[in-house]
Amino acid sequence: MNQRLSFSQTAKVGSRQLLVIDENADDCALMAFVLSKELPGLEIVRAVDEDAFAQVLGRHPPTAVVTEYRLAWTDGFHVLDRVRRVLPTCPVVLFTGSGGEELVRQALKSGFSDYVAKSPRGYLRLVRRIEACLETPLPAKSKPESPNPNPVTAADQSMELLHAVSHDLQEPLRGISRFSRLLEEKLTEADPDIKRYLRHVVEASDRMRAMLDDYLEYLNVGKDKENGEDADLETALDSAIGNLGARIEDSGTVIKRGPLPVVAAGFNDMVRLFQNLLENAVKFRSPATPQLDISSERLRAVWLLAVKDNGIGIDPADFQRIFQMHRRLHPASQFPGNGMGLAICKRIVEQYGGRIWVDSQPGLGSTFYVTLPPGRESITEATFETA
């Protein structure tokens, strides 16, 4: 098979064809998996260099195009320009893990039909964007003779795939880390450069394991949602503080807390929510003794939670960016981590129909606000009086 074209070498006559321009084979494989399940009437062709791109445009004009922003031989804006010259009405979607809000504005201003950020949920959004870009509906999926009362959707399958991949990578990474440490111990008289290289291997594998742990936590959000049980936030906060006991104690963090309600959400997700917010506050602390104030207030239809700290603060220009996956405002050497904590918080809150946002100024601390639906259990009178 021609290595520059894959998934489908040539489009069937009369079929709708999607041209995918992306050099990352894993991303393309997942994209093809999700699209083939959700849009079975769509032929998918992948081009990984300029020759293949030109070949598709010249011989098999696509119905729609999906392109990455960063490519070894060009960029997404050049792709858009080339497509527009040949196929002025062809929809072009930018699907990328690069850039931020400025790239979004620039992309939409330049004429991209849409922009979708690469993320576990991004692959599912991409399906809807492509479907919306097509001029006429794609052929409907054939219905099974006996409807399945619990159908497995493409979203379920893609999330299961991501979960399995993340989980399966854990064991080989543990092996790399373990054997590298054994080599460090054995090579006590080794050349300093060799020892330094081994140290880099150990640190890199540890970072990768931490990243996979974060991915698994992200994918596990909402697992207990189907139980329909309420969560006592007092107990959830206690669990989160217990999980972070050593970090809170070592940093000298002082936590002030008011009464917290029962909400309509999964208990484990609420522990994750508090744990990530607390960890964020401890990590980005100022030279002063870290102080946290956690409170709640009953609004008309939701509970409003506030987690206030006296940390280094956040520039208002970065308020949206901090909730995106792997978006870091500071170098890892200064504040270690994978930039996933607040993205996990956002995913948790949105699973239950809530919102999360921040109010902050550099050097003046931050207050994270969360809305969540009230639980079915009654709230004590004391909670209402103090909220």
Image (cartoon, rainbow, N blue to C red):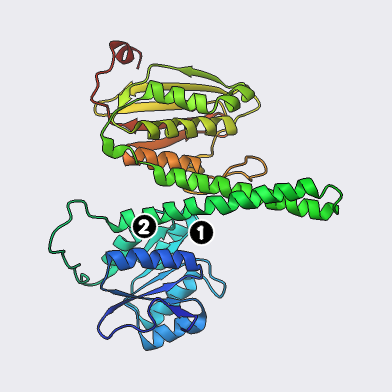
Q: What residue lies at 64% left-to-right and 46% top-to-bottom?
A: 331
Q: Quadrant of residue 138?
A: bottom left
Looking at the image, residue 353 sits to the left or right of residue 109; the answer is: left
* Horizontal arrangement in the rendering, residue 230 relative to residue 50 (left or right): left
Q: Residue at x 42, y 51 (%)?
A: 163
Q: Which mark is residue 158?
A: 2
Circle 1 sits on which residue? Answer: 98
Q: Residue at x 32, y 68 (%)?
A: 36
Q: The C terminus appears in which quarter of the rendering?
A: top left
Left or right of 13: which side holds 357?
Answer: right
Q: Quadrant of residue 152?
A: bottom left
Local secondary structure at mark 1:
loop
Query: Which is nearer the eye, 331 or 186?
Result: 186
Element type at mark 2: helix
Residue 378, percent across and down?
24, 18
Amino acid, disc 1: Ser
* Type of the residue with mark 2: Ser
Residue 187 position in % (x across, y down): 81, 50
